[in-house]
Amino acid sequence: MKKSPLQQVKDKFGGKNKLVTELMGMMARPSDLTKDQFKKKLLAQSNRKLMILHERETTLKTKYGNRNKLIDTLVAARMGKHKKEDKGYRTHLEKRTNGQLLDLAKRVKV
């Protein structure tokens, strides 16, 4: 039988507070939130959502290194043979969330 998100969080991280603390170190904090506000916002999320965020940030870090390298990879994949960079495309990608970027990378297969 599959474990509930609460059980998974307790098994892998020892509790929601530890998972949130780890996520805070992995994610970029929005500029309009203080550290305490950001932590409070993360603590308000469900365990399932926090696990998804952790998996996403871990994939980003292990597979691409950081967000900028992922954007560079996507731009390079779009340039193709012509090696002509589309500045508008880079700006478009920089506005996207990490989840959207990873989804795009899966579709482009990079």
Image (tube, rainbow, N blue to C red):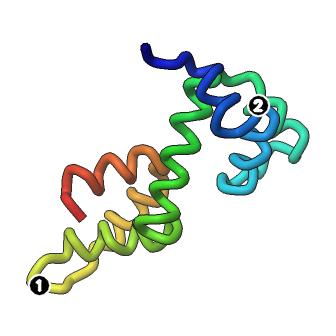
Task: Give the residue at mark 2.
Answer: 15
In the figure, 25 relative to 47: above or below?
A: below
Nearer the observer, 49 or 19: 19
Q: Is residue 82 left or right of residue 16?
A: left
Locate residue 90, reporting x and y percent: 38, 67
Quadrant including the C terminus: bottom left
Assign a secondary structure to mark 1: helix
Q: Is residue 106 left or right of residue 6?
A: left
* Structural distance between the alpha carbons of marks 2 and 1: 50 Å
Amino acid type, label 2: Gly
Q: Residue at x 87, y 45 (%)?
A: 34
Task: Give the residue at mark 1.
Answer: 82
Q: Is residue 3 left or right of residue 106?
A: right
Q: Residue at x 75, y 35 (%)?
A: 14
Assign a secondary structure to mark 2: loop
Nearer the observer, 86 or 102: 102
Dot 1: within a 10 Å radius of its alpha carbon, few (fewer than 14), some, or many (20 or more) residues? Answer: few
Quadrant including the N terminus: top left
Give me the disc on residue 64.
Answer: none
Dot 2: within a 10 Å radius of its alpha carbon, few (fewer than 14), some, or many (20 or more) residues? Answer: some
